[in-house]
Image (spheres, rainbow, N blue to C red):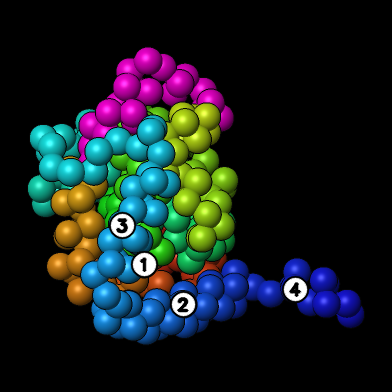
Amino acid sequence: MSEKNREGKRTARERLAEERDKQKKSDKRRRVLVVGGAIVCVLALAGVVGVLAANSGDDKADTEAGPLTAPSGANGDDSLAIPVGKESARSTLTVWEDFRCPACKSFEDGYRSTVHELTESGQLKVEYHLATLIDGNMRGSGSLRAANAAACAQDAGKFPAYHDVLFENQPAETDDAYAKNSKLIELAGKVDGLTTGTFEKCVEGGTHDSWVAKSHQAFQGGGFSGTPTVLLNGKNIYQDQTMTPAKLKQLVQQADKA
């Protein structure tokens, strides 16, 4: 069997486990770099700040403090969750994600169709929480900008579709393409009815930046090990090495019949 065929035979669980291991190793390397960077001189630090400022781009909204505006329909503690699915569903999937996170994309690619099926049937509701972990690890602002844009899509009633588009078109982790509001608005064209003046103003103005920042603070305070963090009825299922889309579906169906 060719290497290409062997790759195609791998299960979703194996791919997710591999992505999780890669992210852990990557995070470890980054921590080493951060420690080493702490001893650089003030002049070198000033130079880095200058480079970051020079590359910030004119279309990035200011990430400093602004009014905390939760997107329409947000619920949960401090209105930090974006709900998808029927409120009457017996099972709740709580998902913490970062739109720049490769492991999050792997989770979405593997579980998207199952989650859609379960939410559309009324058996599952999903509460999405947005984090900006990769911005801190890799530098940049793509996680923040994409999360704000997703919140703007929620205002327009288009969050589920735009959420999927962002993960389906996710750039490489080292490519901060989502830092450009123009890119996020371009991708909105893939969602019927989303590209409006109101949406563009929300994206370009960073309407929900402070809300995203508070969501990330909640992630940091939650004791989670990384993104994605996926909880089914409060239990972390992403850490379960035996979890598959089929098993998730079985667990939700069992809860629905209980």
Query: Would residue 172 appear left or right of 199 to someone viewing this image?
Result: right
Residue 255 seen from this side: no
Query: 30 and 72: which one is in front?
Result: 30
Mark closer to the chain start, 3 or 2: 2
* Image point (10%, 48%), residue name: 78
Range drawn in magenta: 189-209
How far, Cα to Cα, is label 2 from label 4? 22 Å
- Amino acid identity at mark 3: Val
Circle 1 Cα neighbour tier, 10 Å, few/some/many (<14 / 14–19 / ≥20): few
Q: Earlier in the sequence, mark 2 or mark 4?
A: 4
Q: Tell me the residue that label 1 is attached to.
A: 137
Q: Which residue is rendered at x = 39% and y = 46% of the image?
A: 54
Quadrant assignment, res 36: bottom left
- According to the picture, the residue beneath numbered tag 3 turns out to be 49
Q: Are marks 1 and 4 in contact (CB under 8 Å)?
A: no
Residue wearing tag 4: 7
Mark 3, residues whose alpha carbon is within 10 Å: few (<14), some, or many (≥20)? Answer: few
Which mark, by number, is residue 26?
A: 2
Q: Which mark is residue 175?
A: none
Q: Earlier along the polypeptide chain: callout 4 or callout 3? A: 4
The kind of residue tagged 1 is Asn
Between discs 3 and 1, the one toward the N terminus: 3
2 or 4: mark nearer the eye? 2
